[in-house]
Amino acid sequence: CEKRKGEKEKENRNKREEVMDYERLTEEGLTERDSRIPIEPSQEKFIDTKFNKDNKLNEKKHIPLQLTWTDVSCTLDTSSGPPCRRTHSSKEILRGVNGFAKPGTITAIIGSSGAGKSTLLDILSGRKNLGSISGDIFLNGAPRDARFKRCSAYVTQEDILLPTLTVYETLMLHVRLKMERLEGISSEERDRMRDERVREMIAELGLEKVANVRVGDENKRGISGGEKKRLSVGCEMIADPSLMFLDEPTTGLDAFNSQQVIYTLKKLARQGRTIICTLHQPRSSIFSMFDYLCCLSEGRVVYFGAAGGAVDYFEREIEQKCSAYFNPADFIIDVSLEDERRRFALKQGVDLPPEKMKVGPLTGDTSLADIFQSSSLHSENQRELQRLSVKTNEDLIEVAIEEDEEEEYRKHEDEPFLIPEVTRFAVSWPYQFAYLMQRQVKHLIRTPQTSVLVIFQSIFLSLFIGSLYHGTLDGPVSNVNQRVQNTQGVLFFCMVNLAFGQMQALLQFVGERKLFMKEKAAGMYQISAYYLAKNFSDVPGILLGPVTFCTIAYYFVGFRPAFTHFLTFVAIILTLVTTMTSFFTFFGALTKTPQVAQIFAALPIVVFLLFGGFYVVSDTIPDYYSWIQWLSPFKYAFAALLQNQFEGNCICDNVDKDCPIECQGDTYIYCEDEGQCLLGDEALNLWVNVFILLGMALVYRILGYIALRTIYTQKR
């Protein structure tokens, strides 16, 4: 009871500290708000945090970026029905969308479900790769180019983070991969500046209390949902991007955490960043923090302008009043939904009451988007778009949204207006590989469950197989054929058991698919660096089970006692395991879910087993199937194991060598020829089989890399 009481007091104390932090965050107030929204006293101010000026990583000032988009449209081809009677059609997702986003502001995109919010955000951020897209999008008056990714950041709706890393470690990895290495300084100084940068970011995000706490997931509790969202924001802004995109950053959060996230974004905007985000239904206190609002309905703009003037616009244009204590966002979305329902009912021929047929100027097929197109606000926006199509620093200074920022911008008047020429990636390939390798090793060390299970399984099966076959590989001369059969059986079982144990490689990329695609889209590293880091970091796990199994089972079963034969046995098994790991890795990269991967991989595995040399004798395979055996890794591994066990080995007990063994047909052989008889005349050399397996492993690894490059692309 005392322990629970102490935990309760600690929880209450933490809650009070969170409230104090919340009040501290809101200490300085907002620049613009709708006067009709009641504001709590604690929301009157918020802090504009400044970075440490002594940190060289922070010396690079924000290049003020303004994004403009004109006549953006998107059409998606759809199909329905069975394959034999499939019909194709096109669906218009966006039509003629115009707008702009300025430095130092938050532009919110709102609308009902299916209005096109996420589609517009993906198009603006350059991540939309499905459908037919048209329109013009300019960054500081010029088309976007390869440098766009380096100056922008995208925060996904889902918080995709590695659960085994702490908050500090997660941010440190992003610092290393996203920020350019400063040359001419010592590694200690570089590490110190990185550490300082990460700690500044943690303080700015309000994550000091959980800095050394692991992120966690559904299996192991870690930081809260709101802290994960702020960490996701921090991961993207750690490299000081001038332009940020966020897809519904408050989804899944409670009111308190939602407000903290938006306050964090407001602070970032006040530092000169351009922020664009989508939201579904923001509460009134969150709505008041937006500078500009873009409201979509059925893919068209029904309002674009200052967020504080949105309610006045709708009251003026459609003659509907919003209650003083009603959420403006709810009011705007409700109005747009009513308009959609009215026009849909008219298209379906439904008779509506007179009060529904005409709402202010909305009559017949006239929509809110049509009203906005003919409004004076739309004309003002068009003039503003023209004015924002700037080409020089001086023009940009003229459109700076805050007077106190003008002096700061003028300091960089002589610098290149657009993004300076930069490399595609912030750090070179060797550093990418080293940092990713370090992350993978840390992840494996902190998830020992799989390794423990593999060791337990290997010990159990090796003891079981050893006790089952112990003493059966030697015996009376009359049982020679049985001994040979037992030897072949246990060799094939060991081979297949250890090969199938590598099916976990199917999940190698499937488990981290979302994280990889997020980091790939952000341009954090080259795919080859990630692929090799994954492969090399998994080597200990690949070796652990087979080595444990072979060490116990080999002598327990009673294979050839010479140590060289034991080492050869282990080498063959490890080569096969490497090949099968490469095979499963290829199928894991080829498919997107573990279920599909297992189904696709099962078919060739069954075929390879049939042609592995144990179930069907090679000479009896029909000619039209004969070629398949040369594709089976089991054929080469089984042949090598048989050679290691039987070649030059006399299994007869008669020293006079007068114990004939029936070999093939009516042929009888004696001890010195036993191995060659069992292997057949067409058997390849042992080490030739091993090198063929290594070649197969290399081919499967290359195919896996190609699949990872071409197939693992997020469809948006």
Image (cartoon, rainbow, N blue to C red):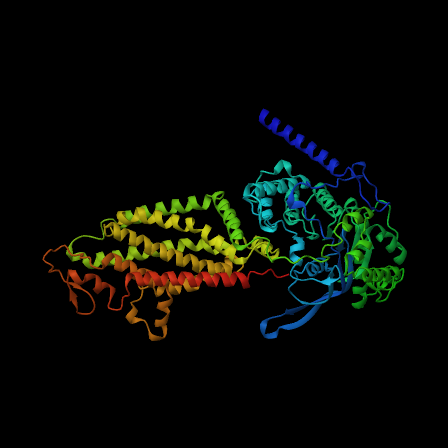
Q: Position of residue 248 (x, y in %)?
A: 70, 51
Location of the N terminus by quadrant is: top right
Tell me where residue 381 sits by quadrant. bottom right
- Residue at (28, 71) in percent of width and height: 619
Q: Is residue 707 visible in this depiction of the protein?
A: yes
Q: Residue placed at 53% from the left, 55% from the top?
A: 429
Extreme residue toward the top, this view: 2
Which residue is depicted at the point 11% across and 59% down?
657
Q: Is residue 533 left or right of residue 301?
A: left
Looking at the picture, does residue 405 appear above or below residue 674? above
Can residue 278 be seen at all in this image of the molecule?
no
Q: Nearest the camera: 145 or 588? A: 145
How many numbered marks, from 0 up? 0
Foreground residue among 632 and 154: 154
Work out which quarter of the rendered image holds the C terminus and state it: bottom right
In the displayed structure, does residue 300 sit left or right of residue 424?
right
Task: Relative to 115, say whether 401 is above or below.
Answer: above
Q: Position of residue 306 (x, y in %)?
A: 83, 53
148 relative to 439 in the view: left or right:
right
Residue 688 placement (x, y as % from top left): 31, 63
Residue 203 falls in image quadrant: top right
Q: Position of residue 533 (x, y in %)?
A: 49, 53
